Amino acid sequence: MRFLLSRLFLYVLCTAALVGSAFGEGSHDRTQFGHEIIVGPGEKATDVTCFSCSVRVRGRVTGDLTTFGGTVVIEQDGEVSGDTTVFAGDLRLESGARVREVTVFGGKFRRDPSASVRGDVTTFGGGAALWMFIVFGLPFLVVGAFIALIVWLVRKFSRRQAVPAPVSA
């Protein structure tokens, strides 16, 4: 029992150390699930990742900005030095915004004439639901069909033949 408790204590201690280093002050990455991310004026962020939420950039993102199911607004004097990728959401570049490359899957791209994009702009418009299905749902559908095939084959070839009971006279 004592060994189990000391092992549990060591596990909790290691987990706390790892989690604490993930939120250290030296890290400027921002990741959110369902909560808006705002990079304020004069503020810097390294990489920004948002799942099912929106991002507003008024300051500077020195790395990549990626959202899944959310809207991105890069406001006046906002800058993204890396790639800006939006899945199933919209991207809006306001006056004076600066980005390197833009990719939008299943959403709309709006750009003020004075906003600058230094690299490529790639948009795959259309219904967000269709793109989300193709990107995320189709692989699960293929894996599910493969598993169903294996189960069917195992059941088909593992059935035992019924042996007639002996007739007693």
Image (spheres, rainbow, N blue to C red):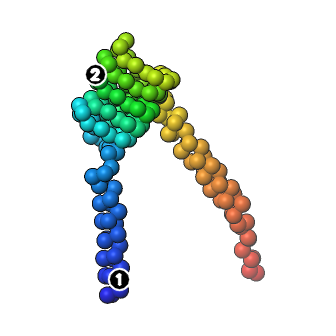
Count of numbered labels shown in the rendering: 2
Q: Residue 8 appears at what percent x and percent y?
A: 33, 76
| CB contact under 8 Å: marks 2 and 1 | no
Give the residue drawn at x 65%, y 55%: 150
Q: Residue at x 35, y 14 (%)?
A: 114
Q: Which mark is residue 4?
A: 1
Residue 148 circle label: none
Residue 167 place in picture, x, y as percent? 75, 76
Image height of 117 relative to 148, above or below: above
Circle 1 sits in a helix, a strand or a loop, which is it? helix
SS class, disc 2: loop
Q: Residue 9: which quarter of the image?
A: bottom left
- Residue 110 falls in image quadrant: top left
- Disc 2 marks a residue whose amino acid type is Gln
Q: Determine the residue positioned at 72% across, 74% down.
A: 165
**Amino acid type, residue under disc 1 in the picture:** Leu
| Residue at numbered disc 2 | 76
Viewer-nearest of labels 2 and 1? 2
